[in-house]
Image (cartoon, grey):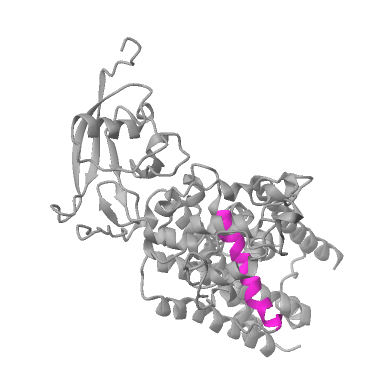
Amino acid sequence: MSERRPYRRAQPRDWWAHKPYLGYTVRELSGVGVALYGGMLLAGLICLWRGPDVFDAYRRFLASPLSLLIHVVLLAAMLWHVVTWFQTMPKTMPKLIVGGRHIPQKHLTTAGWVLAFICSAAMIATVLAVGALS
Amino acid sequence: MSDAIARTKTIELRVLRYRPLSDTEPVFATYQVPWSDDMSVLQALQSIKDAQDGTLTFRWSCRMAICGSCGMMINGDPNLACNTFIRDLAPAPITIEPLRNFPIERDLVVTVGDFVKKIESIYPYIMPKVPRSIADGSYLQTPAQMAAYESFSDCINCMLCYAACPQFGANPDFIGPGAMALLQRYNGDSRDGGQQARLDSIAGEDGVWSCTAVGVCSDVCPKQVDPANAINQNKTKSAFDFFLRLLRPGDGS
Amino acid sequence: MTQSGMIHTNPKRSLAPIFWLLFGAGGMVSALFGPALIVLTGGMLPHGWGLPANFADYAHVLGFVRNPIGKLVVLAVIALFFWHGAERVFLTLKDMRAGPPPILRVATYGVAALLTLVTLALLLAVGF
């Protein structure tokens, strides 16, 4: 007993940058893209509050090449968020047993991706319909 | 023996050694080990102990991936030594270290006492929903009821998931994937009525809330227990319990 | 004491569930509608693809935001997107050991709380 001298190895500070953890870190950073996009929307709301001239300047910014670039980058982050969100979400649910058999998590993941596609498509379709009817 | 498989090839094993009485810190030792296509990493370690250095210390027992004793870091990944084969890693040198995130007692042997305490802390036994005597006969359980918890009962306590978990590496008090798998084995069992007691035991920062869903624990599990599912479904339960307890009569916790 | 001599104490309850549920709600809303929103604000609305030219002009957007339902939608989207990002940035900074957790909480949750209040204030300020 007195011969024990347990040795603790320190956790590397950059563990999150190496495999198998790098994928997890990239996944988490896609969530940062979600917040940045929220910031863009808030900027629009601030411009709206400030009046028609400032809001028109915001609209001109949205039509600019820089805005297109930002949106493309944020879309990539958002799509990665969608993909990884539904990969992780089944882990937060108890095992689904239907008809005596366990439903594999990857079926739930696929269902989530399909639902996301339907919801986003429906939102765009709704905007187009409102545009056509007005 | 005429039917012995001849070990004509040699492979290099770099093994992290640590002898508390003589070493200030762990240091790698290199061994050239004759091997054949049927050999596991465990057998290579045993061959070193038999023929080259009898002081090499490591845990092992069943040699068939069911006792959970021989977990170690093999080329940087947590694995059971008896379940990892030289033929899949050769010809490059193999690096062997004790399980990450645990204190080293000696060579490849790590301290397991805290893990045992965590297992004990989650009420690892059926707490019957309704009192039952022998005269009532055995419980009946449908295949669906068993499927709800069965994978969590497959855990062999090998601790590979703790070696994989960076949040356990950052916080040694985190209850961790293996103990949570056992918790869910009981909470998911139709015979059990102890769900609230177990939920209360993991509602703190060192309970479920140290987990950030990294998920590598489930990737390394040799028995497909899916401890990540055990922990994360209990985040959902713990989160709802956080608000629902305000509606519960009397317990004031 | 139990049979094994184990004393079970219930640990101090964490407040993490509040932020985790906000993270979850924001994650779900952004996963389902985020791509559509980006396509709308990044492409369709500024360039009028498939839409009348004045669809997203000041008057129309103001009308939407003045509507009570519109306010709820805008508040939900902006606030939840910030709370989702706040939890992820907090945990990532904690993984990277960028600072003591209490400071990291203020820098993430605190900013999200502030921006939520700013959003609410603006939504009220544009009127009904």
Residue A54 vs B22, above or below: the answer is below
Residue B68 among magenta residues: no
Q: Which image quarter holds the C terminus of chain B?
A: bottom right
Residue extending furthest toward the right = A133
Quarter of the rendering containing residue C78: bottom right
Q: Quadrant of residue A72?
A: bottom right
- The span shown in magenta is B228-249
Measured along the vertical axis of the image, is residue C60 above or below residue B9? below
Looking at the image, residue B253 lies above or below residue B162: below
Residue drawn at x 77%, y 82% as measured from the top left: C68
| Residue B235 seen | yes
- In the image, residue A112 sits, relative to residue C121, either above or below, namely above
Q: Locate residue B112, reporting x and y percent.
A: 37, 55
Q: Residue furthest front?
A: B135
Which residue appears at 32% of the width and 52% of the height?
B110
Mainly helix, strand or loop, the magenta region? Answer: helix
In front: C9, or B41? C9
With B81 as the anchor, is B57 left or right in this view? left
Q: Position of residue C11 (x, y in %)?
A: 50, 75
Q: Nearer the viewer, residue B162 or A123?
A: B162
For the image, the number of numbered tags is 0
Report the front residue among B111 and C1: C1
Give residue A90's position: percent from left, percent from top. 64, 54
Q: Position of residue A84 (x, y in %)?
A: 57, 53
- Identified at 76% across, 45% down, the residue is A100
Determine whether, in the image, residue B159 is placed left or right of residue B218.
left
| Residue B243 sits inside the magenta stretch | yes
